[in-house]
Structures are given as C-alpha cells and as structure tokens.
Image: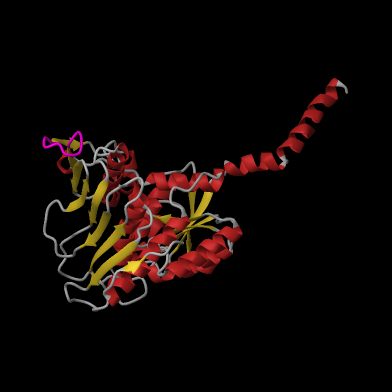
Amino acid sequence: MSRSQAPLYALIIHLVISTTPKAQERMSQRELIRVSVVGAGLGATVFHVPLVLSSPDLFILHSVVERTPPAEMQPEGTIAKKFNVKTKLVNKFEDVLSDEAVELVIITTPNSTHYGFAKAALEAGKHVLVDKPVTTTYEEAQELGRIATRKNLILYAFQNRRWDSDYLTLRKVLQNGSLGHITDFVSQYDRYRNFLKGSWKESAKAGSGLIYDLGTHLIDQALHLFGRPARITAFLQNLRGIGEDNVDDNFTILLHYPRTEQNPYLLTVTLRAHPLSQRTPQLRYTIRGSKGTFVKHGLDVQEEQMKELGVKAFGKAWFGRESEEIQAELEVVEKEGDNAPLKSKITSEKGDYRALYRNLGAAIRDGEELKVKWKEAEMVMLIVDLAIVSSREGRTLDVPEV
C-alpha cells in the first residue's frame, strides 16, 4: 500500500469500526434521552420539569402534552412559558406515542389516568416514569410490569420521598444499629386543613383520597425499610365530614411484622395522616428500638425550595438541607437494660430528588439497577388494596406472599 493510499485506508477502517454494533451502542449511550411530559399541573411544574432540566447531560425536554393551556400561557404552553425553555407543545397524547424521537414518557396526570397512559406508552415502545399512585389497583400495576418486561422497557415509579432528608437520616440510623432491634415505627404526615381545595383529588373517582396520595409514599418507605408485613389493619375515614363521604381524608394503617432471626421482637409499623393537626413543626417519625428512640419533627424542605426557585434551587448550597431546628433527636443506651441514656441531635442527611432521575437516566442508557423496582411499586398497590378492604370490613387481613 502506498503512502497516498494510507489516509483512505484509515478512513475506511474507521467507518467499518464505527458501524459495528458495539460502537453504535456507545454512540447511542452518549445521546440525550428525549423526554415527553404528559400533564402540566403541579406535579409537572414543581417536580418533573425542574428535575428533567436539572440533568442536561442526560435529558432533553422534547415535548409537553397539555390539551388546552390557559389563555395567559398561550401560544407556547405552560411549561415553555414558565421555565423559558424551547419545547414542543402537544395537544394529543397519541402524537407522543407515534413520535419516534420520544424515548421516555413521564406521566403526571390525575391518578385515574395513570394506568391507561402508562400502558399505551409501553405498548408504543417508550420507557415510562409514572407518578404515584402508579395505578389504582394491584392488578393494574402487575399488568404494566408484565408489559414492560415483555417489551424490555424501563418502568419506574416516582417515589421521590426515598430521597427526603429525614428518610435518608433515619435509614442511616437504622443501618448503624444504634437503636437496637426495632419494635415500633410510626410515620405520619399530618397537616391542618379544615376546608376543601377543590382539587380532583377530593372527588369520588378511582384513585382519589389521601391513601392514594400521601399514603402511597408512607407505604413505600415502610416496605423499603422492612419488607412485606405478615398482616395489615387499616382505618380510612372522611374525618371532617366535608366533601364526598367515600373520599378519605384521614388514615391509620398498621403493618404487623412477626419475630425473625434478625429481630427477636414483634414489630408494628403505624402509618397515619391527619387533616386536623395543628402543630408547628409537625411530628414526622417516632421509632422505638430495644436500645433507644428516634424522634423527628418537620418536613423535608425540597418541595418548598423547588416551588420557590424551580431549577435554580438545585444550584444553591442549601438545597435539600434541613435547619438545625428540625434535626432528629436520638436517645439511646449503650446496652439493653441501661438506665443512663445518652441524648443527642443528629445532623440531617442532604435530600436530593435528582438522584431518582439520575438513576432513571443511567438505567435507560447504561443498564444501571433501578433504585425503585417495579415489583416494589406493585407491592405498594397491594397494600393499598388490602387497606381499603380491611377498613371496609373492619378486620385484620393476611398479606399474601407474591
């Protein structure tokens, strides 16, 4: 081969190598994931759009499905105008399904529509992130899981509160064993609201009521910590007696765990939300163990920070950091039976909802293991179904192995 032919030969080799399957895979992994957000309400504006925009190395906001933007948001649409971003406004969900450029569909619409939208997106070959509750029944969640498996697609539940500051803090405490064996875990999300907000969440539709709203977050955290319980007892009520009587505004759910080789004590997990709790700050967690107690007041700060500053919040040093005033209190003994407890405050872990989206992007591009597995999302819906039956029939139910 002559010297004059060498550059041409090198070019041919480069083209051959760059078109091999492995090379194409590496190239595709560098491409941004084109995202379509279905819905333009609170879930989109406070959570999903800021989180998508916070990772420009992973995602690009391709389009937003908004059937009829308010007059003041036209012609661009709510998201484009609010966030000053260039994105396509789509009026029909079907147009997203037929758009080959869209790779990931984010569902943030009324609860009763989650199953239908997610199923259609999966059948169209799209990866899906669906807001909680992922569906309105366990059977629906199972069906979505089967479709995702069959189509080899990522199906992800938006359980962002696994990255709450207080949850990360208590998880670290449980892992280091300073409380000993856990006997009692109380997780509550109370507020004071003696009126209706006029939201679709307060209407008697599938997926309405507080158990589908806050309840799915509390259930997910409990299952993430302790796994499947043996039995469940639940009380769902319309405590205030306003609105439609069959839409719960208050719940108490008891998850019963037996003794195990790891924990020789019985464990009761109590999950509750109360609409008429006047307290500042509200009590969030109380955890009792054989060697101590963990008490936490106040709520994670990320939602309020994102409401105030949107995407800009992520660049602040204080983002996701709780104030010292609501740090958890720990009271422990060195060994069981001691009567000289040590009291201390625990520096809160930094919360960061972006971790969920980073994991989602890495799962799509690099096959990273999901932090929120769909089987876990299915189990949340099983517990919701059982809680509704338990409350209606006034009895404790066994939780089946699945």
Count of numbered tags: 0
Q: Please state if 223 lies on the left or on the right of 103 as rendered.
A: left
Specify the quadrant of the image occupied by residue 272: bottom left
Give the residue displayed 46% in from the left and 53% down from the top: 373
Give the residue displayed 30% in from the left and 60% down from the top: 255
- Magenta region, mostly helix, strand or loop? loop
Foreground residue among 85 and 218: 218
Residue 284 at least partly seen: yes
x and y, in percent, of residue 183 in the image: 24, 50
Residue 337 included in the magenta stretch of the image? yes
Q: Please state if 99 lies on the left or on the right of 342 as rendered.
A: right
x and y, in percent, of residue 161 in the image: 33, 51
x and y, in percent, of residue 206 in the image: 37, 74
Foreground residue among 272 and 315: 272
Give the residue displayed 25% in from the left and 59% down from the top: 271
* Screen quadrant of the N terminus: top right
x and y, in percent, of residue 190 in the image: 19, 59
Residue 77 at least partly seen: no
15 relative to 201, above or below: above
17 relative to 155, above or below: above
Residue 295 included in the magenta stretch of the image? no
In the image, farthest residue toward the top: 3
Q: Please state if 158 lies on the left or on the right of 265 as rendered.
A: right
Q: Please state if 13 lies on the left or on the right of 101 as rendered.
A: right
The figure's colour scheme reads secondary structure
Foreground residue among 72 and 137: 137
Range shown magenta = 333-341
